[in-house]
Image (spheres, rainbow, N blue to C red):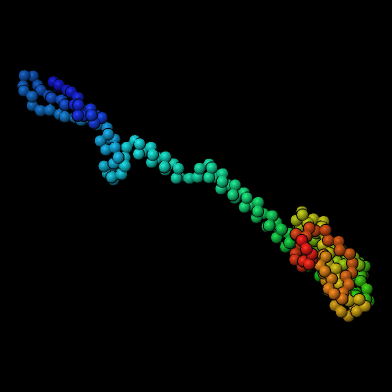
Amino acid sequence: MRSSWASPLASSAGGVLVACNFGAGGFPDFGGVWVMVVPYSKVYPHSDPVAGRPFGPDWYHSAMRTRSKSAGFTWIELTIVIAVIGILAMMTIPGLQENMLKRQVKEAMAMADVAKGGVSKSWALTGKMPANNKEAGAPPKEKIISALVKEVAVDQGAIVITFGNNASKVLDNRKITIRPAVVKDEPAVPVAWLCNDVPVPNGMEIRGTNQTDIENKYLPLECRDTTKKK
């Protein structure tokens, strides 16, 4: 190789142009090889020769940053989403619990039917309310049980249901009372059954004591006095 040099043109393009002339002994030059080495980003800084897309180091890093941002949530976005879900859960769970407790109370109230017949019959035959389960002709209070109820007691005509067994802990050992309302001195008129503190119909009297100690919000509508102002 007799000579090699760098072209100013190649240098201005950000690369190196190398010219090599080859010869052998005393023979004249018979050929040459021209090699120009130029960084691709200097010649085509904004294009992809294959697809015509932007290309180059700057484009690559920008594309990677964009792809990283669009690949998923940032920590701030994820935190906001979690916070919103938490707020919605806090708003929803109490409502679900109330509905569940109302269903349990309503289901347990059906156990009063075991004693209602005896109380009504006693009133119709004697004009008096039975003092207890025995006088009402009902099973002993501890024998009237269910998945949610641990006893049903007759107390001066009123039927008192005590929660237990598989009932919610919120209701455990709590009571709800269903009382008979009658027309005075008219035992032939059927008994009207009223739950908790529901108003007594005009012309009727309520018998027995209300022993309900369950929070009002857990009671079904038929056990609430809707005439009271909140």
The spot of residue 5 in percent (x, y) is 18, 23
Image position of 137 (left or right of 81): right
In the shown orientation, is residue 32 left or right of residue 216? left
Residue pictured at 42% horizontal, 43% vertical: 67
Residue lying furthest front in this view? 229
Residue displayed at 83% across by 61% down: 212
The residue most toward the bottom is 188
**Residue 64 appearing in the image:** yes
Q: Is residue 137 left or right of residue 10?
A: right
Q: Is residue 226 above or below residue 29?
A: below
**Callout count:** 0
- In the rendered image, is residue 120 in sight? no
User: In the image shown, does 46 or 174 lie closer to the viewer?
Assistant: 46
- In the image, 150 versus 19, the foreground residue is 19
Quadrant of image for the N terminus: top left
Residue 118 pos. (x, y %)? 87, 72
Q: Is residue 8 above or below residue 193?
A: above
Could you tell me which residue is drawn at 29 percent across and 37 percent down? 45
Q: Residue at x 75, y 64 (%)?
A: 220
Query: Quarter of the image containing the C terminus?
Result: bottom right
Identity of the residue furthest to the top in this view: 26
Residue 103 on image: x %, y %:
72, 63
Residue 216, position as x, y percentages in the image: 78, 60
Q: Residue furthest left?
A: 27
Indicate the quadrant where residue 66 lies.
Answer: top left
Q: Say which quarter of the image contains residue 222.
A: bottom right
Residue 16: quadrant of the picture: top left
Residue 89 as seen in the image, left or right of residue 156: left
